Amino acid sequence: MKTILITGATSGIGKACAELFAKENYQLILTGRRAERLEKIKQDLISKYKVKIHVLCFDIQNKKATENAINTLPESFKNIAILLNNAGLALGKETLDKSDMQDWETMLDTNVKGLLYVTRAVIPIMKKNKSGHIINISSIAAKEVYPNGNVYCASKHAVDALTKAMQIDLLAHKIKVTSVAPGMVDTEFSTVRHKGDKQTADATYNGFTPLFANDIAEVVYFVASRPAHVNINDILVMPSAQATATIVRKGN
């Protein structure tokens, strides 16, 4: 039974991936900052799929907490075959001169440094096994810059660059690396970006059908289930009504 570690597993894409991989009989390590949610998801999935699940409640922005969490995994969960770097967020949607500098720190600490901390902690396990797969959840924001996206776009461009760097650096160790870059996905993402303003957040998806968390989970599972000799380096997934980060067809 393979083990997958999923960061940001308490909602959205992370939660949907946990559900799908549990259904496919994977052993799960689920991480997040909300202990009650983690425990509920764990119990629900164990009850439904009879799989083994270990939860780790910590903030990936904290390097020491991240290292401790990975290093203290129970022996039966240490053989991580797949790392899904899903945890990430956008905060604010203002021009660079008006945006909150603390939002910059949080986005860079989570989307870039947090991803690095978790990856660095897991790589030795994969190197020892001479196999593994790191899947980074990126974004259309990694491919183009759009108005008021500034630091969030920069953070996802960094994820894109780091994915390419990992593909080079880890090739000799037989570790596969993939970037999955979604367009507009209807999750808590927009609510977080608009700092709890659900009305504004929901309006983001008015007039067309966006992607949903399950859509991305299916893509992640497809990527992860390819044969050992196949790697999907980079995949951009958009709603059929979306052409670019800012061009969307609304209405019938």
Image (spheres, rainbow, N blue to C red):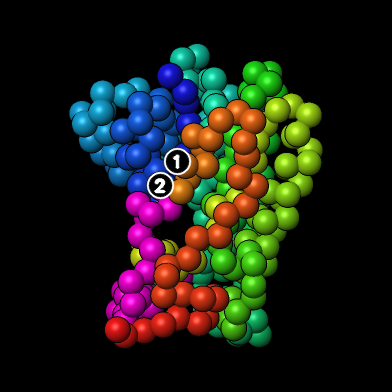
User: Is residue 204 in the magenta section?
Assistant: yes
- What residue do we see at 35% from left, 52% from top? 214
Q: Which residues are magenta?
A: 193-217
**Residue 173 placement (x, y as % from top left):** 74, 27
Q: Does the residue at mark 2 contact the one at mark 1 (Cβ under 8 Å)?
A: yes
Name, please, the residue furthest toward the top. Answer: 75
Please name the amino acid that badge 2 sits on: Glu
Name the image quarter holding the N terminus.
top left
- What residue do we see at 26% from left, 39% from top? 40
**Residue 224 placement (x, y as % from top left):** 51, 37
Please name the amino acid that badge 1 sits on: Tyr
- In the structure shown, which secondary structural element does the residue marked by tag 2 occupy? helix
Mark seen at residue 218:
2
Q: Nearer the viewer, residue 138 or 233?
A: 233
Does residue 46 lie above or below 34 as drawn?
A: above
Q: How many marks?
A: 2
Q: Nearer the viewer, residue 142 or 101?
A: 142
Q: Nearer the viewer, residue 156 or 98?
A: 156
- In the structure shown, which secondary structural element does the residue marked by tag 1 occupy? helix
**Residue 105 placement (x, y as % from top left):** 62, 63
Q: Residues within 10 Å of mark 1 (few under 14, many from 20)?
A: some
CA gap between label 2 and label 1 equals 5 Å
Which residue is label 1 attached to? 221
Rendering quarter of residue 200: bottom left
Does residue 90 lie above or below 54 as drawn?
A: below
